[in-house]
Amino acid sequence: MRRISIEERRARLARRHRLVPSAKTNDVAAIARDLIGLHATDPASLYLSAAARMKKPSIEAVEGALYEDRTVLRMLGMRRTLFVEPVDLVPTVQWAASHAVAVRERARLVKFLTDAGLAADVGRWLRKVEKAALKALAARGDATAGELASDVPELGEKLVLSRGKKYEATVSVSSRVLLLMAAEGHVVRGRPRGSWISTQYRWTTAEQWLGTPIDHVSVDEARASLVGRWLRSFGPATVDDIKWWTGWNAGDVRKALASVDVAEVPLESGGDAVVLADDVASVRSPKPWVALLPALDATTMGWKEREWYLGEHGPQLFDRMGNAGPTVWCDGRVVGGWAQRRNGEIVYRLLEDIGREAIAAVDAAAEQVGRIVGDIRYTHRFPTPLERSLRG
């Protein structure tokens, strides 16, 4: 097999992640589909990730896809991370990733409830509460966690997590139960209570929101489908990349790959990677481009082995837990970072010399982010060293 160069990997990234002007679209579901989900842990990141790939970026268009057209859905997926997925991919993600997350979450919650001594038979108590919550939610149509607790008093109970440790926290039973029910695909997050950067959602049943229950897919079939789709957008990639992105163990990754028609290719940067067998043809480089991508963007977070697009900038642009901050991209590589200051100004810092024309394009991209955000002020959940420096 021919060797795939770093330049070609960057060209694939640019085209397939809709970062070049010719690939942009106003179809939010198409953007989420091509990225196999937009990271949604940080609401601002979700909207700015979509906007960076839209011909006519707007907050309203993303809200329309989420809440009016309902072509995309928030769901807990790979690595227990909140994603926004196109509705057609929901069953695949549910059974390839969310199902395993739910199994672990149920075991954790049962332990928390047992430690709290809320019932003699915790498993039975939890099933009863879940059934009552679903019934109440179906009757209301949608509700906040607090509203549900007024219908199901058990949801108002409190749990102390990590008692005695510096990160001890007291949470309501409702938050943990709803998280579990969402991971299992029974309930979904609807509109937020506040603005588009709010994380306080109203909840509804999956059947009410989608019009039908989430289809069942065998785990093996779902995982093979997920890996194939991911390689179409992110390949070539190493096995470690796939293992990291999915959150699966090495055995699960190998099993999924065995069900997909892949080819092994050498990389210019060293070592071997896999691509879909029908995706070995060369990809030409696009015209020069720049982009400002937000924290936790699906592209920046897409691979475990990032040197080919990140260079040596990781310590400044990622936090200690591996969360990406806002990044400046130029022709398929990260060249700097950016931030929103307290007065709303969008500022950036380049870590490489990219030339006057590219700098002018970055200026224009920063102005566009400012127009999209408008009067909203936000702080990313996982600030990085360079972002802190820029914010002042």
Image (cartoon, helix red, strand yellow):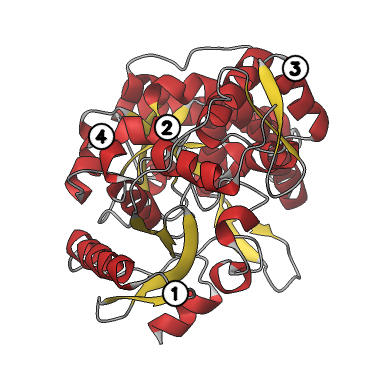
Give the mark nearest the N terminus, 2 or 3. Answer: 2
Q: Is residue 199 visible?
A: no
Which residue is denoted by mark 4 in the rendering? 65
What residue lies at 42% left-to-right and 43% top-to-bottom? 285
The circle on residue 353 is: 1
Q: Earlier in the sequence, mark 1 or mark 2?
A: 2
> What kind of element bears circle 3?
helix
Q: CA distance from mark 2 to mark 4?
A: 16 Å
Q: Who comes first in sequence, dot 4 or dot 1?
A: 4
Residue type at mark 2 is Asp
Query: Residue 227: where, in percent of width, then height?
Result: 61, 26
> Dividing the picture into quarters, in which one does residue 221 lie?
top right
Q: Position of residue 135 (x, y in %)?
A: 42, 24
* Residue type at numbered disc 4: Ala
Mark 3 and mark 1 lie on one chain; the one further toward the N terminus is 3
* Point 45% across, 30% down: residue: 187
Q: Residues within 10 Å of mark 3 (few under 14, many from 20)?
A: few
Tell which tag, 4 or 1, sits nearer the viewer. Answer: 1
